[in-house]
Structures are given as structure tokens and as C-alpha cells.
Image: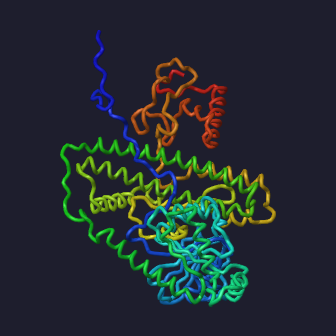
Amino acid sequence: MTPGPLPSVDVPDPRRQAEPPGCAPLPTRLGVTAPGPDEPMAVVVAGPAGANRRELIAGLLGVEAATLAVPPGSNLLVQHAATATRAAYVPGYRQPHAYGADPLAAGPALARPPRRVELSLPDPLLRHFAVVDTPDTGTLGVAGGRVLRDAVGRAGALLFVISADQAFSAAELHLLAEVARTPVEVFFAVTPGVTGPATPGDGAQAQDRAAPGRSGSARRLDPVSVSIEAHRAALLAAVPALTPARWFPARRAELPQLRRALVGWAADEVLRRGSARPPVPAGAHGRVPVLAGVEPGELADRIDRQARACARRIRQHLALELANIHLRVVQEIVFGVGCAGLPQMLDRELEALSLLATAQCDEAVRGLVDEAAARVFGAPLAEGVRRRITHAVRWGLADHPDGPELDRVLLVTSTAGVAGLTGAGALDALAGLPGAQRDEVLPPVGVALNGGCWQHWRAPGNNDPNAARSWAQRAARGRTRTVPRGVPPLRGDPSLAGRGARRCGRPRHPACLTTPPAHGDPGSRTRPGRVTTTRAPFRFIGSPDPVARWGAWRLHRLRRSRRRTPKRCRSPTGHG
């Protein structure tokens, strides 16, 4: 028999079966988020400790610096309102804690610091944009830098404040390099510093001593301008893309120039965002033609397989992220902040993980909608049609029995457990910078530490690194099972652990060698939600992922214990 010709590499083989539907590419890291047309404009103020950011913001808004005081690690959001008010948004509560806006007002006694404090002032500058003061860049860490980049991208502008006697750190240069690749507007302000700049008289005398024989009036050196030029030269040597950024001295007499520059940016930004999306997108009204011959059953089966593939990929990636978080937490416990700083660091790690899980779930759902709509309509989706589909799916999820489970917050307790809290107010309390109303199918993923966890590890009697490491390991394993919450659980999904043959003590019996029927089929003897396994997970024993190694080891021990204990055969034939 003569073999036929081999097909070319660039020509698809019609006899080959179609590959199973996969998942669209998902974001693997949290970068600078692009601002949406409906996002509120804001200026994020960042900088190292000792740069007098609070005094600079107080000078811009014309208030006392004590009014802007917040607990360490919390964001301060200053926005416009007719009357001055202040409220703290704490994870674990559905309602904010309101207290006075004057400098002498005592805040509420909270079990843990809030994610943000909103201060409303009747200042005319706040009509153009809000001001967000962030924690010191030296205390953010890896996860805090990711959260800051997300906030800067959605806000639209970054005001970096640095002192005259400070230098840019490696983490700050990395942050500025990431922001420089985006359309975010960057401003720099240089404050006097701790020792303060040299007086103009000292600079003039030094210049006269350097050139005693020169006649005529010598040009005085401005120490503030010299400091600005030095900082600018050092920054551009590392990040040349920030050449168009504007620099301002943080002197009270020159703060009006900074105000005018920020107002000018806000005027241009509101026009750009307003023209990015029309008020009535195409396809928002009217009928949409549908292709003939589309089988609903086949389409639903394909969507179900794609959803399972996306859920599997998201869970695998978040399991790796949790393993990396566990390694960073252990490193900080032993060599860094210790047990007292464990809650603050882990809370930031969970905040960054929540943002990443939300971005991945949103991207996966968009890919599912686009692929299904392309098969139904035969053309790319218009923005108006996409919105109509999104709203319809959200209405369907609201009536689904598992719909309320998607709209909840996961709180890590002091026992490494998980407590759930539902409601839109609970999700809003987790946002460091609130954004526009979401136009996505799934609600955001929210994970945080509750107040009891903060009180436990900040107590002097709980300063035990070994206990903290054990607690962090149990907490990471618990989050592996509960995150992402935005993706519905896959009951009986064979892709999670590999569907195999349920074997009894008689491996030669034909009924025990066959693959069990799917859940819900007639004759299925497996319980709903139970996943059968094969020896496929043993390949994870040599994996560098600690979570995968631990799961493979536990599965190996469980199988050994089952082989030692004789059990009755549960096959449908009843031979045992």
C-alpha cells in the first residue's frame, strides 16, 4: 500500500478533528490600567517618606496639614462637596464610618486601618479633579507598587513629590518607568527637605569668593533650581521617556503655577475622555441580524467548555500567585517587618491579587462573549450590542441560585479561615480608589484581612515567627480553594484533576474499568461536586510550585491509605 502525500504545514488537514475550544489570552500581571471614559479624574500624589507630601497638598487646597492625617497605610481621597465631611471605609463593614473634618476631630476606634479615607472639601480646585494621597513608596513593597500603578492609570495623572536631599530609589524608578510607557501625565515637585536649601545670600557669597577678581554684578545661584536640575538629570539618565514631564518647586509662592498646570491637564483630559466614547454607541438600539443554522445546543456546549478552560487557567495562575505571596510573606516575617507588619503586607498582597483576579475574569468573559457573538451574528460585535448582551447576562446571573454568591467579599480571619460578607457596600469598602460603575458581567473579586487578624498579630504576645509562618501557609492554602470567587465553581470538571476510572479491589472487572458517567446522567453513582482522579497529578511532585507539590503529596498519601483498607466494590453490577 502506497502512502498518500503529506499535507503542507501551512494548509489545514480537513480530516483532522477540530481542537477543543480554549481560552483567550489573559493578563498575567497587574500593570498600569488604562483610564475609562467614565472614570473620575484624579491626581495621585506619591513619594518617599520625609518629602512633606501632606504639606504640599495642604498648600494646594488651602487647608491645615493636620486635616489630611490618615492612619498609616491608608489612602486619602480628597474630593469636592458643599460641606466638609470625612468618612473611613473599612473592609468588613457595609457602611463607612463618618467623623468630623476638622483637625481636632477624633476618628473612630477601628480594629484595622481603612483602605481609604474620603475627605470632602468645598475647594474650587477639586471641581476639576480629586486628589489621592498614597502611602510612602518605601513601605509599599511589590504588591503595593502594583496597586499604585493601577490607581495611577485609572486616575490619569501622577504628582511625584521628592525632597531636595533625597534620591530616587530602585522601586521608584521602576514605578516611573512603568508609568512613562502610558498616556499618564507626570508632574514632579521638589520640596526643601529636612535641612532646607542654602540661603540666597550664602550662594552669592560663595560665588563672590570663587571669582574675586571678576567685575560686574554676579548672577546669584538659586538653590531650588539647582536641586531640580540635579534630580531631573538623575531621573532622565534612568528613564529618558519622562523628558516631557514638568517640574515645580514646592514653595508657597510658586504653588499657583502648579495649580494652573494641573487645571490645564484636567481641561484637556476631560475633552479627550469625552470624545473617546460616543454617548450613544453603535448598535445600542434596533434589531441585529442573526445567522441561520446556528444550533443552540452546540453553541451552549462550546461556551461551557470554554468557560471551564478559562476557569482552569485562572485557578492555576492564581495558585502560582498565592505560592509567590507565601514566599514573600515568609521572607518578610523572618528578615523584614516581622509579625507586627504581617497584616499590612498580606492585606496589600490580597488587594493586588483581587485586582489581578478581577482583570482576568473580565477578560475571560469578554472573550467568551465575543467568540459566541461572532458565531451567532457572523460579524464583530458593536459596542452597543456588547452592552446589551452584558446587561442581559447580568440580569440572568441575578436570578440564578448561585448569583448572590458572586457578589461577596472574602475576609481572612485570625484562624486562617474565610468569612464571607455580601453587598455592594462591602465591595466598595475594599477599593483604595473608587472608580466608575462597572460595565462587566461579573462583580469584582474582593479579598481582605478582617479586624481580628490585625489585632491578633499586632499583639505583643503573638510575636512568634514560627506560628506566623504556619498561619501564612494555612491562609495561602485556603485562598487557593476560595479564589477566584468571581468564577463559578466547576462541579465534576474532569479538567481539574483528570477524569479516570473508578477502580475497586478487582481491577479486572469490566464494569470497574470503564469511565464513570457524567454527573446528572442516569446511572451515575457519584455524588454531585465530586471529582474523580487518576495518576496524572503525580507529575506535580517534582514541580517548583509548593502548592502543587503539597497537593500531589496529599493525594499520594490518600491513595496509599485506601489501598491498605479493603473496601466493598461500588460498581453498578453489584459483583462485590
> Total marks drawn?
0
Q: Quadrant of the C terminus?
A: top right
Is 541 drawn above or below residue 267 in the view shown? above
Is 279 displayed left or right of 510 in the figure? left
Is 419 drawn above or below residue 264 in the view shown? above
Residue 250 vs residue 441, the one in the foreground: 250
Q: Residue furthest top?
A: 1
Is 487 displayed left or right of 439 in the figure? right
Residue 534 vs residue 306, the one in the foreground: 306
Q: Position of residue 438 (x, y in %)?
A: 41, 66
Q: Position of residue 20 (x, y in %)?
A: 37, 37
In this orientation, does residue 68 appear?
Answer: yes
Which residue is located at x 51 percent, y 82 percent? Answer: 258
Which residue is located at x 51 percent, y 67 percent? Answer: 242
Residue 340 vs residue 561, the one in the foreground: 340
Q: Quadrant of the N terminus?
A: top left
| Residue 224 image-quadrant placement | bottom right
Is 528 displayed left or right of 55 in the figure? left
| Residue 226 image-quadrant placement | bottom right
Q: Position of residue 377 (x, y in %)?
A: 23, 51
Q: Position of residue 320 (x, y in %)?
A: 58, 47
Here the colouring is: rainbow
